[in-house]
Structure formats: C-alpha cells, structure tokens
Amino acid sequence: DAKTTQPPSMDCAEGRAANLPCNHSTISGNEYVYWYRQIHSQGPQYIIHGLKNNETNEMASLIITEDRKSSTLILPHATLRDTAVYYCIVEFSGGYQKVTFGTGTKLQVIP
Amino acid sequence: GAVVSQHPSWVICKSGTSVKIECRSLDFQATTMFWYRQFPKQSLMLMATSNEGSKATYEQGVEKDKFLINHASLTLSTLTVTSAHPEDSSFYICSARDISGWGGSANTGELFFGEGSRLTVL
C-alpha cells in the first residue's frame, strides 16, 4: 500500500508557483521522499528527492517538514508543460526495493 | 543519463493471442526491473519485480501464468501477456534503477521509467 496521501487535483495559474503537498506520517528514519511526475501517456519522470533537508534542482524545490511527516514540492514558475500527475513516494534510496504508487495529484496549469 | 526503453510503444492484437513487451536498460545494467500496469485515469499498479537470472516476484492478485516475465540478461526484461483478452488492454510500464551509476546518473536512487507500451486487445 502507498505510504503517502496527496490531494487528487490542483490548479495553478501559468507563471505562478505550484505548491503540491504530500503527507507521509509513517515515514521511517532512513526513507527518502521522492517526487515523480507523469505527463499524459508517458512513463513517469523523476523530479527530486530528499531525506530531511530542503532540496532544490533545476526543476523544482522540495520542502520537508522538520518531523518529516509531510513535504511540499514547489514548481517556482509553472508552465503549461508542467500539467501532469505528480506522485510523492517514500522509499529507501537505491537498492532493489519495489515502489508502489499512490493516486498522485493531477496538476492543471491554467493559461 | 540512464535510459530505459520499451518496445513496442503500442500494440493491437486479437483476443487469444500473446503479446511480448520488451524493456531495456540502454546504458546501465539492471539486475532488477519493475513492471507496472496503468488503466485510464488510474495510478500505476505494480505487477511484478523482474529479477535477472531468477523467477519474477508477482504482486498479490497478478496471475503469473498470465503475465510471463523473463529477465534473461542484465539489460533486458520481457513481459508476455498470454492469451490476451480485452480486459488486459492497458498501459504497461517498466522501470529500473541505475544502482551501479554506470549510466552516468548521479546515482540518486531514482527509478527510470520506460516510455510505456499501450496494449489494445480486440
């Protein structure tokens, strides 16, 4: 079973920041938070991951609360191409562990 | 960076026939690959874990005789849908991790996904 809960859908105006929340209250100490997104009819794509510190890369920022029970993915300037389903996953980094997906958040970027 | 490729990207077949989908890690070796199935407007559902040189591990409710998985090399896993029926029509996606880092990735532990294979059974 997925270990995360996310809102089913969100809208964001083009050019504005998109903030996607994720709850993972049962995360264990050595599990990471990973974010992927899936554009329609494509395989998912990795976005970012983190353990307990906030992370930033060219695609997004990841804010993890101090108790690690929730996190927020931030797309700083959403574009129409960011319209996708975003999945928040908790898993051990690397290794052979299988990954199960929750329902994700469908982000609709509006012109 | 690490790339996973699937073939075919789409396939249409008649009911009762078998269909094979290939998943290749193009620039890294993958001792483990994962197969997912996705129905319209639903999330990815893990079907099985493909292990190089050994039997696949199937998730509960997935028929191993229906969905044959072969992982004969470190870069290729195949999923064969046997005696396909219209209810098997779905989007099938494979994934793998670049554990060795040979694919040039920063070995972030991320999963790399194939482009997906859309199966339509008539």
Image (cartoon, coloured by chain):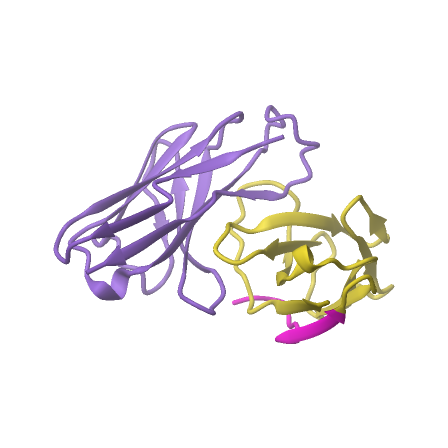
Q: Which chain is purple?
A: B
Q: For the point 58% across and 33% down, which residue is it? A: B98
Q: Position of residue A9 (x, y in %)?
A: 64, 75
Q: Residue at x 25, y 66 (%)?
A: B87
Q: Position of residue B81 (x, y in %)?
A: 24, 50
Q: Is residue A58 left or right of residue A35?
A: right
Q: Is residue B3 magenta?
A: no
Give me the chain that's yellow: A
Q: Quadrant of the C terminus of chain B?
A: bottom left
Residue B94 image-quadrant placement: top left
Look at 67% across and 34% down and name the residue there: B107
Vertical placement of residue B117 versus B30, above or below? below
Q: Quadrant of residue A75?
A: bottom right
Q: Return the x and y of residue B72 as percentages of the image width and height.
A: 32, 30
Majority secondary structure in the magenta region:
loop
Determine the residue located farthest toward the left in the rendered image: B16
Q: Which residue is situated farthest in the front direction here?
A: A111
Relative side of B107 to A77, left or right: left
Specify the segment rendered in magenta.
A1-12
Looking at the rendered image, the quarter that the N terminus of chain B falls into is: top right
> In x, y percent, where is residue B116?
43, 48
Number of marks drawn: 0
Q: Up-down: is A100 above or below B17?
A: below
Q: Is residue A63 left or right of residue B84?
A: right
Report the residue at 63% width, 59% height from top.
Answer: A89
Closer to us: A50 or B43: B43
Task: Choose between B85 and B58: the one closer to the eye.
Answer: B85
